[in-house]
Image: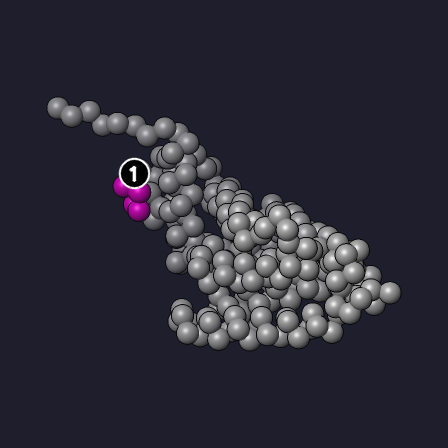
């Protein structure tokens, strides 16, 4: 008789998170039951509960991996020679590409925004994600001002926060569209053109 091989705990945990991301994106947090995730993996519900004692804990782990994957994809677009303004442009473009190419992940980030006001744990994680995202953009704006490629008539933190929030709005707009490649491209093009026009008004040499 063939013996059943048991997967390492880390591998099983990774599989659970992957299936949870699929389930959360497909049917939402409430309907993505442990049983649904277990069925997708062909294991018992108790096998899922062994790794995650609550759906909130599973969602938080999924969010951590999504944020890490997003950061990795953005970093891959950058080159050592890029100045701060180029990095800022690439940051925006890569995030929109991520929202298009990894729609389920972007949908779950939107889920976090929607649920943050109802869950203290998710609210804290939301503040962490948003805070880091804003710090990243504020830092790039400040660096571009130092490099004299960006003119700041108002405090750089205000500009950076506004730009970050504009990007979040663009991502939400993209993932709420019908899943149609042509419509995605049109939306992305409109956003990139609007952002480029805004930047041109801000990139005369800093005083």
The structure residue drawn at horizontal position 50% and vertical position 47%, both measured from the top left corner, is: 69
Is 85 or 6 nearer to us in this picture?
A: 85
Answer with left or right where residue 78 lies relative to residue 97.
right
Residue 25, position as x, y percentages in the image: 43, 57
Answer above or below: position of 201 versus 24. Answer: below
Query: What residue would you read off at disc 1?
Result: 43
Extent of the magenta region? 39-43
Residue 48 occupies quadrant: top left
Answer above or below: position of 28 versus 75. Answer: below
Q: Is residue 26 visible?
A: yes
The structure residue drawn at horizontal position 66% and vertical position 63%, both measured from the top left corner, is: 165
Residue 177, position as x, y percentages in the image: 46, 71
**Dominant secondary structure, magenta:** helix
In this view, the residue farthest toward the front is 81
Residue 94 occupies quadrant: bottom right
At numbered mark 1, what does the secondary structure look like: helix, strand or loop? loop
Answer with left or right where residue 74 lies relative to residue 35.
right
Is 18 or 33 nearer to us in this picture?
A: 18
The structure residue drawn at horizontal position 59% and vertical position 59%, both measured from the top left corner, is: 90
The N terminus appears in which quarter of the rendering?
top left
In this view, the residue farthest toward the left is 1
Q: Does the magenta stretch include residue 127?
A: no
Residue 66, position as x, y percentages in the image: 50, 49
The structure residue drawn at horizontal position 60% and vertical position 57%, both measured from the top left corner, is: 91
Residue 22, position as x, y percentages in the image: 39, 52
Q: How crowded is mark 1: few (under 14 residues within 10 Å), some or many (20 or more)?
A: few
Residue 17 occupies quadrant: top left
């Amino acid at each position: 008789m063939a013996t059943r091989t048991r997967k390492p705990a880390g591998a099983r945990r990774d599989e659970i998170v992957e299936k949870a991301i699929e389930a959360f994106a497909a049917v939402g947090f409430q309907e993505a039951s442990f049983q649904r995730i277990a069925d997708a993996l062909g294991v018992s519900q108790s096998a899922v509960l062994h790794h995650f004692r609550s759906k909130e804990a599973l969602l938080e782990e999924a969010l951590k991996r999504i944020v890490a994957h997003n950061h990795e994809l953005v970093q891959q677009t950058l080159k050592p020679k890029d100045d701060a303004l180029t990095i800022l442009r690439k940051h925006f473009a890569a995030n929109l590409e991520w929202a298009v190419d990894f729609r389920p992940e972007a949908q779950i980030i939107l889920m976090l925004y929607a649920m943050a006001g109802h869950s203290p744990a998710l609210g804290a994680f939301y503040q962490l994600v948003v805070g880091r995202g804003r710090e990243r953009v504020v830092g790039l704006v400040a660096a571009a001002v130092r490099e004299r490629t960006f003119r700041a008539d108002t405090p750089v933190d205000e500009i950076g926060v506004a730009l970050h929030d504009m990007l979040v709005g663009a991502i939400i707009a993209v993932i709420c569209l019908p899943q149609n490649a042509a419509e995605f491209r049109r939306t992305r093009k409109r956003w990139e053109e609007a952002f480029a026009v805004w930047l041109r008004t801000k990139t005369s040499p800093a005083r």
